[in-house]
Image (cartoon, coloured by chain):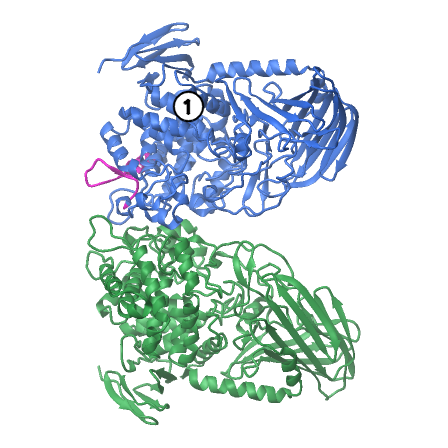
Chain colours: A blue, B green
């Protein structure tokens, strides 16, 4: 069962599972909502979401429908462009012959269970009712978003009863939905032309056309259509006899003017396929995906499931389309408006890069594609070059309505350059000779304008920035930002010619990089997060963090966060994670000892980095504790209510592979280099690894490791300091050096 | 004519004059809008104002009606409570017998002139038309908001023609108005019960009842009423004969549930009064006001008019009601939502305090009255004591929707304590023994919680604040804030017992005050605005301040302001102005030399402080230049479009009295002490001065000064270092000491 996440449905946590149970195929994602209409939680309520940081918002626990096509954005009047929540097409409602609704919130429910099959990417829901006439009724819903036909959602409903009875079934497309409380539908047309079809065409206020066609078929009778202005239904009767299953199928094709050209023809072709044939094709694709990307943990079921859930969402949320990156909620909710953050480059790219580089390519290509918007963004601020937005839409425009992030969290531009270098190092060295070089040069030009040299200083400075730690909003010479910008500049000095820089300008990039430094404490070892960091206020956690079930940020005022020596998330340590060979173990350890007691981990991006560095430092208890904390964010509490923490899912993969397996980045090693340290609870860790054209499978057990070359390219390999060479189909075995 | 401001009406600047020509009486204020409906500028447009700093907003130049009752607030959905713009009751529209409208924007206008009489507080407008039948028509409008009956607005329209003709006249109350683009009317009722009356009753969405009754009378005929949902009109015919004036009067009484109890009876009584009798009574009150508060400048007409315009608005905008303070736009526009800032305590109080202390008392009492809200505000942030809001409504709640100000610009709490001490010193020493002492103690308690001592420091710190210079948003140990907080704490240590502090707590306040210091540069003389101020970026004005017709802030991005060594307004110098005996001339001069080249004066609060300190330093050219810059803010350009800069008007008074007359604050002198240095252009400066019960009249000429005691209390007096004593009705003469 460790491929399954099972929920015994409890209304208090149903919304979290709704997010966690999101299915998707790349171009289409659907939250794991129940099929019946949640009457107590209307989905057509207008409300005004504030332009605040989402971490300071309070969301309700009411169910939220969500159907998303990545990149389909429309303008919110105060918040800017956001991904549109499309009509809810899963609707299948039951009514007893007596006229009573049999819905998932009814007191007639005897049992209610949902199950996400991670291996198959299917969601099942079984609900049993005490029927009004004393029957025992069971409704079993299955669904998947087809990997074979990624615009298609397939549903099957199987009904049984222990007595003869009849039910009324309603199949619905409900276009009366909102996105973050806002109605983006400019025009909705709903038709039921017969043959079990409901057709919804919708024009968004951004001018996009959406077409949703569903076909409901099966053992129902007397089917007729009804319409409301924003909904269309098919109503029919299902006769149930003891021991005989009644089966209804619903297939929905969701297309937009972004993609599929011939939806009607496609739908017609799909009608001839059986459920089983569609499921088999879908499952086969997922089997292959798992084999090429799955992280398998043995010895600890909880870890195994966490890793699988993370990889599941990582695979699901990737769109094979360079018009989008990966939004912060993995297309499973609206909390971050479907926008693209640095999460893609830093937290998500490695998984794709080291498992299936072609998937990584579309992610880096997205930033190439949106270079013009970044140039325009820099210009708006008065700078040359390219300033990548803190929150991007598909056009790469800055969408963030909060200036502390949009204006000051500038490291994202260097994160893009870092990701390009990472892609080049791990997958395709030629990448930096193409259009990507222009991005590297334009971001370097931005840094040239954004940095300055203060009177009396020998070094250059980047002043007034927010680093990864968002509890320090306007700081000077933030370590992470300076180091990243210097990397960006050095990279530009190397690839300058390909990116349109003269040799003089390229040289200038290199000189500028050398003039950007880090601020250190008096001991010369501790790297300060920024100038004067050690002169900030004591955060007084003992006294002020009263309710530990909430973040520190929810316990105190923002102004106290902003003046205190408290970190929302890793900042100096984040830098050390990304540049593993730039800092000595002593420096890392000193930073660890200094910052850890000050770090709140109020950001979900924090635990993974800590676990990885703890592994490096041999702090196995910390590595394990942060694994446990970071790997279950979406599996516990209200974690996935507003969408999955997809960057944290990327962090789970990184903890396993960079942390416990000790893989060093392709930016610092030519050949795969691992220094595994498994947690005590694990007996084995197995994962595939793509590295510069080689395809390996790494298996680590206590006291041994093996690397099998599953590709056609030989490669050097180093494990626990022992270097060897593995040819195609060969396996190399390793043992740790005794301490 | 130097009591008049005359406008030859030009649409491009009409809106600025509209604000500048605001009339008011304390409880009622009306912008100087034209009486006819500006058809091209509808006043009922809904729009969404952003929750941004108003200085970064762009406003249109379209006319904006405004009728305000101070303190009448209602909730804006995103911006918070704001002062409600009431129905427009001035409406008097003319139509020619031919059916053509004769309005102020018509091409038939031959001449168009408005004139504000500052001495009489009346507004006149004369417009002449080429009539459609070849007549020469003239419409002369007069109005005033009665000082005698401060809820009453009186209008007179005199029409003439050189040929017999008839006009149609429409008298309107238009309730279809918005406040900052938002409609606060929950219920509007409009009636025209005959007898020239229009009655508008309105309930705001805050539940306040507003009653507007207007009576239109005079030589019109066939009067009939028409109504629209949100407007009521009376229409009548006016027959014009050559050489004979037709006179129409309109009187409007505006009352709310905040004030007048018997509006109908009051209105009935007022109907029997002639226009002249109402005007005479009004003018007599204003004559008395001017005599007790006017600053008279001789030798320079421009300066004289600036001073008079400033005093006019200072007198107008004061409400004899401790339920309100003075809003940032002097009840002449909506740009700051009718809210109360530190402007009242620091920029406006001195004028009232040193001319009519009873007016000053209602201002300080307002903060006593709203103490509970300040205590609640502190609690919300996790502090004991009282944190006064950056932007207060009548209940003293924090209304500021922008956290950098609401959270970080904390000096306002100490400004309140400073104002209390100022009031006690200049007017009533017993004030600090009453309820005010609780305010002083509660604000001190806030500072005790808000300050902290960093490891390794002997001194205490206030971290993470914005000082008066709002281009430095989150700084540590801001000089102004620290010095003000220390003053607040010392004051609390003195009045602690009366305010509910134990002797131990009072002693602690004193110790804490002593531990708050200033940051100084290496020379030991220069006071730094905050820690690390000298390590900020060069603002590069030469290169970046390209369009000098705009503020620096409008030339560059906010993030550049926030990281640069540029000041929006005086900060260290502001402190030195408020504490004239705490800093040596050397310290002031050093600060002047250092900060002046860095100061943008993007805030209207900046020039006055500079002029005053320049006077102190003997920099007479600078004192004069800043007088010229600071005294004409509302008289030039688009200055008063969104309301008058009432704090700058207070600054004009301060420049004359504290600056050129060199009056030292009652906080540092027992007797009035002046060190006059008139600008070369002035031949004389005369002003009344109230000081601890004494009432003096000061007259300064080149080479001599005299002080006449007009009250009944003798007082010591010092001018140019010469001390003497003036008894009632005595005059003392002074000459400057030769250098």
Any part of residue B629 in sight: no
Query: Toward which corner of the image does residue B258 lie, by quadrant?
Result: bottom right
Furthest-front residue in this view:
A134
Which of the pair A684/A442 is nearer the observer?
A: A684
Q: Position of residue B214 (x, y in %)?
A: 67, 77
Q: In terms of secondary structure, where does tag 1 sit? A: helix
Furthest-top residue in this view:
A730
Residue A560 in the figure: left or right of residue B81: left
**Above/below status of A264 relative to B272:** above
Residue A162 in the figure: left or right of residue B553: right
The chain letter under disc 1 is A
Furthest-bottom residue in this view:
B729
Residue extent of the magenta highlight = A507-532
Residue tagged by mark 1? A653
Residue drawn at x 47%, y 19% as measured from the top left: A356
Which of the pair A458/B223 is nearer the observer?
A: B223
Query: Toward which corner of the image does residue A103 lie, by quadrant?
Result: top right
Q: Position of residue A368 (x, y in %)?
A: 48, 31
Number of marks present in the image shown: 1
Q: Is A508 inside the magenta-drawn segment?
A: yes
**Above/below status of B149 relative to A157:** below
Q: Quadrant of the C terminus of chain A?
A: top left
Q: Is A117 inside the magenta-drawn segment?
A: no
Which of the pair B19/B258 is nearer the observer?
A: B258
Q: Position of residue B15 (x, y in %)?
A: 57, 68
Any part of residue A446 in sight: yes
Mark 1 surroundings within 10 Å by alpha-carbon count, few (fewer than 14), some (14 through 19), many (20 or more): many
Residue B664 in the figure: left or right of residue B212: left
Q: Position of residue A157 (x, y in %)?
A: 67, 22
């Amino acid at each position: 069962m460790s491929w399954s996440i099972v929920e015994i449905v409890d209304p208090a946590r149903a919304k979290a599972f709704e997010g966690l149970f999101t299915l998707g195929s790349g171009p289409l994602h659907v939250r794991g909502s129940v099929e019946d209409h949640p009457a107590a939680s209307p989905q057509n309520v207008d409300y005004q979401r504030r332009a605040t940081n989402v971490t300071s918002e309070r969301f309700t626990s009411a169910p939220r429908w969500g159907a998303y096509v990545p990149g389909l954005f429309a303008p919110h009047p105060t918040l800017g462009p956001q991904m549109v929540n499309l009509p809810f097409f899963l609707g299948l409602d039951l009514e007893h012959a007596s006229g009573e609704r049999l819905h998932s919130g009814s007191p007639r429910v005897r049992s209610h269970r949902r199950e996400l099959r991670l291996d198959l990417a299917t969601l099942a829901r079984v609900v049993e009712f005490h029927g009004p006439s004393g029957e025992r009724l069971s409704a079993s819903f299955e669904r998947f978003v087809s990997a074979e036909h990624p615009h298609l959602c397939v549903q099957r409903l199987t009904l049984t009863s222990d007595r003869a009875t009849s039910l009324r079934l309603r199949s619905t497309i409900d276009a009366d939905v909102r996105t973050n409380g806002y109605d983006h539908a400019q025009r909705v047309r709903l038709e039921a032309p017969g043959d079990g079809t409901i057709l919804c065409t919708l024009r968004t206020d951004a001018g996009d056309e959406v077409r949703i066609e569903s076909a409901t078929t099966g053992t129902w009778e007397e089917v007729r259509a009804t319409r409301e202005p924003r909904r269309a239904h098919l109503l029919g009767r299902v006769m149930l006899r003891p021991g005989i299953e009644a089966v209804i199928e619903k297939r929905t094709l969701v297309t937009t003017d972004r993609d599929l050209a011939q939806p009607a023809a496609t739908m017609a072709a799909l009608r001839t396929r059986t459920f089983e044939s569609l499921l088999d094709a879908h499952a086969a694709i997922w089997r292959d995906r798992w084999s090429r990307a799955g992280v398998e943990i043995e010895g600890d079921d909880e870890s195994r499931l966490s890793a699988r859930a993370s990889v599941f969402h990582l695979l699901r949320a990737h769109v094979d389309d360079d018009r989008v990156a990966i939004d912060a909620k993995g297309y499973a909710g609206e909390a971050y408006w479907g926008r693209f953050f640095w999460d893609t480059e830093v937290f998500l790219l490695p998984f794709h890069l080291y498992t299936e580089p072609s998937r990584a390519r579309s992610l880096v290509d997205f930033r190439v594609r949106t270079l013009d918007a970044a140039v325009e963004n820099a210009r708006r601020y008065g700078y040359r070059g390219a300033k990548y937005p803190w929150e991007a839409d598909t056009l790469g425009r800055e969408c963030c309505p909060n200036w502390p992030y949009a204006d000051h969290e500038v490291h994202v531009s260097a994160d893009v350059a870092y990701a390009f270098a990472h892609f080049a190092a791990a997958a395709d060295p030629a990448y930096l000779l193409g259009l990507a070089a222009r991005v590297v040069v334009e971001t370097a030009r931005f840094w040239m304008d954004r940095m300055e040299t203060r009177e009396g200083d020998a070094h250059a400075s980047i002043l007034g920035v927010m680093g990864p730690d968002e509890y320090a909003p306007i700081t000077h010479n933030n370590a992470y930002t300076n180091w990243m910008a210097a990397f960006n500049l050095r990279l530009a000095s190397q690839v300058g010619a390909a990116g349109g820089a003269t040799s003089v300008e390229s040289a200038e990039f290199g000189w500028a990089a050398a003039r950007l430094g880090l601020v250190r404490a008096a001991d010369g070892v501790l790297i300060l997060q920024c100038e004067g960091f050690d002169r900030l206020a004591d955060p007084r956690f003992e006294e002020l963090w009263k309710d530990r079930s909430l973040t520190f940020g929810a316990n105190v005022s923002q102004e106290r966060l902003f003046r205190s020596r408290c970190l929302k998330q890793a900042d100096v340590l984040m830098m050390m994670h990304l540049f593993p060979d730039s800092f000595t173990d002593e420096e890392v350890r000193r930073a660890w000892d200094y910052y850890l007691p000050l770090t709140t981990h109020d950001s979900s991006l924090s635990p993974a980095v800590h676990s990885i560095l703890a592994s490096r430092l041999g702090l196995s208890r910390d590595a394990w504790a942060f694994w446990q904390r970071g790997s279950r964010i979406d599996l516990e509490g209200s974690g996935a209510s507003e969408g999955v923490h997809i960057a944290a899912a990327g962090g789970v993969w990184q903890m396993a592979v960079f942390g416990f397996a000790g893989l060093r980045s392709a930016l610092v090693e030519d050949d795969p280099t691992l220094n595994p340290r498994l947690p005590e609870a694990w007996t084995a860790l197995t994962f595939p690894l793509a590295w510069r054209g080689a395809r390996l499978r790494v298996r680590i057990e206590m006291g041994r490791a093996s690397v099998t070359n599953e590709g056609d390219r030989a490669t050097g390999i180093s494990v626990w300091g022992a270097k060897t060479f593995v040819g195609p189909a060969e396996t190399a075995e390793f043992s740790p050096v005794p301490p």
